[in-house]
Image (cartoon, coloured by chain):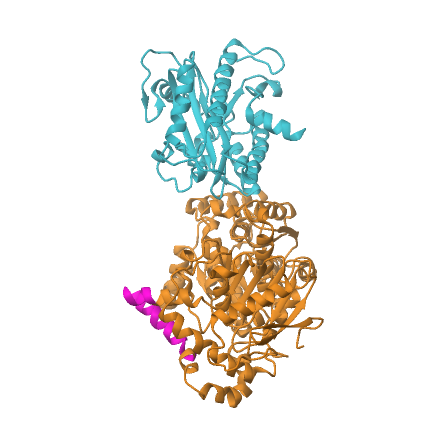
Chain colours: A orange, B cyan
Amino acid sequence: MAGLNGARERRVRTGGIELCVAELGDTDRPTVLLVHGYPDSKEVWSEVAVRLAEEFHVVLYDVRGHGRSTAPVPLRGGFTLEKLTDDFLAVADAVSPDRPVHLVGHDWGSVQAWEFATVQRTEGRIASFTSMSGPSLDHFGHWIKQRMTRPTPRRIGQLLGQGAKSWYVYMLHTPVLPELAWRGPLGKRWPKVLERVEKVPAGDYPTSSLPDDAAHGAWLYRDNVRARLGRPRPDAYAHVPVQLITPTGDAFLSERLYDDLGTWVPDLTRRTLPAKHWVPRTRPDQLSAWIAEFVRANEDAAARAPKPVAAKSDVKPEYAERFGGQLVLVTGAASGIGRATAFAFAEAGARVVAVDRDAEGAVRTAEMARLIGAPEAWGETVDVADEQAMEQLAAKVAAEYGVVDVLVNNAGIGLTGSFFATSGEEWKRVLDVNLWGVIHGCRFFGAQMTARGQGGHIVNTASAAAFQPSRALPAYSTSKAAVLMLSECLRAELADQGIGVSAICPGIVNTSITATARFAGVTDAAEEKRRQQKASRLYGLRNYPPEKVADAILGAVLHDRAVVPVTPEARGAHLLSRLSPGALRALARWQPPA
Amino acid sequence: MASAVTGELSAELRGFREVQRLSYECAEAVAAQLKPGVTERDAARMQREWLHERGVRDWFHRPFAWFGDRTAFVDFRVPLQFFPTNRRLEAGMPFILDMAPVYKGYTADIGYSGCLGLDPLHDKLLADLEAHRELILREVRERRTLREIYEGVDRLMVRQGYANRHRAYPFGVIAHKIDRVKERRWAPTLFGFGTQSLKGLASDALHGHRDGWSPLWSPYKFSDHPPVPGLWAVEPHLGFRGTGAKFEEILVVTDSRDPEQSAFWLDDDLPHVRRWNEGAV
């Protein structure tokens, strides 16, 4: 069986049909039942299934008429949700007669599973349900009705948006043509289409049964869509906890479909994933992590009782939905922006690796991160300028904690003083930390991200000095301008692989960068201290908190922004750099008093 | 001001210690009665009534109570926001009770931090306050300037990952002098502060201005002087992402040459100190 090596196979008879059921993992473990979508067979789950099988009893089956299950005769009327529910119960009874199963559905598998999770006769047979890219047709029907009966410009927009995305549903309702297309040219070209448009990695998926799966599966739409959307059930309330995973780049389903889901599902956990429709193929690591976490939480009622600590402070829900359980590495995390960023990710439920030269500070950041919501957090001591040390860190992180989902290259040092006052040594140190530190981070951790091929995000902390020239900060500005351009180039290169790159340009922020800054040409320690204190006081007066920069960083990752100036002066300078660079040049000539 | 850590406290210091203990008893009694639904105003009134029943008639300042993220003074812009509001206590919320009664002519000013239910983060903040109590005493004994000590506390907070929230107090003070107050039958308050105590503070400020010191221990230039003998109510206040914690108690500064005698905490038998000692055992 393609990609499902070691699976035990059996056949389950129900209503004149034979279903092909595959099982992996220890049968004593909680059962996770994976239901595939259209046009697919159970092999769509192969990547997710093998990962889950390490911990659970994983069961997959070919939906009737798909893969190696037999098709109903006649096809018309053989694919109603009622019959699909019969199939599910038959499989559940065969593989887990005594305990309820944890349902997972993708696409049409999720549409079916919504039916299972909302009809009465399955009560007690389902422990939890993870849904991705497949709404309940009943909820969908109500969603449309609400928007038709009380149209506002926004609601009409939502209707038209989803209406356009559903073009293929209309096509599937035409007679014969879809079958001809799938058995003909479309079926042949489909693997290439998936690869090119949906970025599904090539390999043993889709299977050779695709043309038949797709031709039979058209009846899923014809038997159910018009009936349910026209007369949605009024009592489609979920009787199980639901985890909704929404791919934000889905070409077929609008995120807005789930806006009212709270009214149908009393116990709802939301997750978002920056990916296209076929997440079981493109993001198996993240999916299996979220599924496993949700199954564990619903197996053990006690473990579920305490809601995350984050609930008490005002964490934006969209951050928790996106970053929950992700692995985030922040450099320069012992103070300032880095520490605030580590804390913000921790509050959103991410796992955090805090990296800094200052060992005590890094450990402290990790310790506090655990207290505010990070399920796990570690402190690591590394000088980002040290190539070997960074390489070792990357290897260690990959081996012990996993591949980093979000990398924040934030470590940086300050240096001020005129060009000629700056010694070669000072130039080297600034570039080593501010630029090479970022390069090392992007090279070693970015390489792991691309090798995994499941997306990710890199954030580099540049500066407003990257576009605001200044005679006072030549070395620092040069290093930061390089970081900005590096980020832009890398963004272009990694876009194809679903890895975003953002450059953050904070501006004047109240952190300890001034207290540790070097002043080129100043050799007297007391004079240096005096200048550091003076700069710190000025930054203190400005008093822009690093927490706001951290928020901008989370926002940049969430919305995949390219360049994010943060403070008002940074935004102003960014605007002027495009509208009237001459003004910035004039400003650059200003000599700050010593 | 002569006194001893080892020997007997002078009658005057005993008077201050008595009112400080009374205040902490009040805080513990009120804290024990707090339950979900109680408002800040309720909590402030409970403190006021408890102390009034035991003979308190005048205040350095009337009792404050802060719940939830107000313990970290989140979004405080104007001093009026310090006054108790109708915010209701919920399970898991941190709270701070702060009161400064005058009893038999002696003043205390205390702050008590607690949490309704268990919260490891709040425990951590309370535990981390211990280092500040030690730092302040050590540096006062070294006779560093108050401004330097203030900055030292600031640096320690930053290292710990916290925000300095005493900066939100009027003049950003971490401490202020307190003194004896004449008992009058009529003891009005002005914006929550006892007029008698304000008078004392104003007179100190005037004298201090002539002699180059201030009764307010702040980050500003006017605190750039070594500690001045007297009683200081010290109140380091930590904030961390919507959770705040502080203690406030009296530090005695004398003009003794013996470092041990030159400065000491008036009383080491206070709830937060007991808590640290129990944790250490």
Tell me residue B7's x, y (percent): 62, 11
What stretch of residues is rendered in magenta? A145-168
Residue B212 x/y as whole percent: 44, 25
Please tell me whether residue A61 belongs to the stretch shown in magenta.
no
Taking A564 as reference, is A533 above or below it?
above
Tell me the quarter of the picture where residue A526 sits: top right
Does the rendering let one see residue A418? Answer: no
Determine whether, in the image, residue A583 is placed left or right of residue A80.
Answer: left
* The N terminus of chain A lies in quadrant: bottom right
For residue B61, above or below residue A270: above
In the drawing, does residue A302 fall left or right of residue B96? right
Coordinates of residue B186 in the picture (x, y in percent)? 31, 13
Q: Which residue of the protein is positioned furthest toward the front in this rendering?
A: A16
Residue nearest the viewer, comparing A126 with A292: A126
Q: Residue furthest right?
A: A6
Query: From where the camera sits, is residue B202 visible?
Result: yes
